[in-house]
Amino acid sequence: MKVDIISMSFGFNKDIEEIEGAIIDAYKNGILVFAAASNDRQLADDFQISFPASMPYGVFCINAHSAGHTPKWSEFNPRCLPTRDNFCAVGEDIFGPGSTQQDGKGPDKLFSGTSFATPIAAGIAALVLEYVRIHKSLQPHRGIKEGEREELRNYQTMRAVFMTMCSPMFYYGRENPILPWRLLRDEADYESWDTIKDAMKRKDN
């Protein structure tokens, strides 16, 4: 698979062996995987995060939050679990094209749910990857050869960068909105790659 990121805006009520195997292969090959947590499951008696977001390692389980300077925890999300990172991205009132059964086209409308937050989180990861590729100071002195695994394509490393973007700090067992402006600030005296390098050093914490 010659990709950097896989985004999955879907989920299942049970584990699927073929999908799990493909995700493990992707993880081993330095491909970042994002999956939607689930929607409207807070009150379910048999509550569970949807598969494959429920995989304990190698998949970014993405929840949704509302827009605004202070993101609010969304009613679409599963309840916070103390053993999960509980990352979330904007996923309420996302403006996009609608569709009709007749011609597949329709007026723009608002969408909400973790399925819409997931590609946004994946896009933030893509932005970080591109940023690092532009700034050679973040790469090994010998450079990155074609086909070579970049460090930020490692799940644990990107997780550390995401933790840096959470505000005001990362909380275990609580919601953690991913706020990219905390990392990629437009300030003359601020070097974003210094913060990224510091996060990369903490990847095993």
Image (cartoon, rainbow, N blue to C red):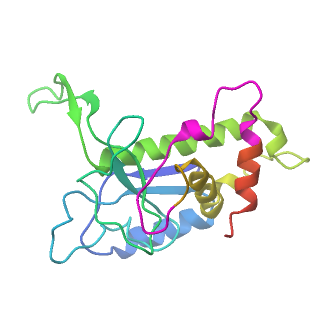
Answer whether residue 30 is magenta in the image. Answer: no
Percent across and percent down for residue 140 are: 86, 50
Q: Main secondary structure of the magenta part?
A: loop
Residue at x 53%, y 67% (from the top left corner): 58
Instruction: Note whether 71 is above or below 28 in the view shown.
Output: above
In the rendering, at what x and y percent does residue 154 appear?
Answer: 64, 60
Q: Nearer the viewer, residue 151 or 95?
A: 95
x 36%, y 45%: residue: 117
- The quarter of the image holding the N terminus is bottom right
**Residue placed furthest toward the left:** 102
Q: Position of residue 14 (x, y in %)?
A: 27, 75
Q: Which residues are magenta?
A: 171-193
Residue 20 seen by the camera? yes
Residue furthest out toward the right: 141
Res 148 seen here:
no
| Residue 192 included in the magenta stretch of the image | yes
Please state the horizontal and vertical placement of residue 61, each as a whole percent of the image. Answer: 42, 61
Tag count in the figure? 0
Identify which residue is drawn at 31% across, 49% down.
115
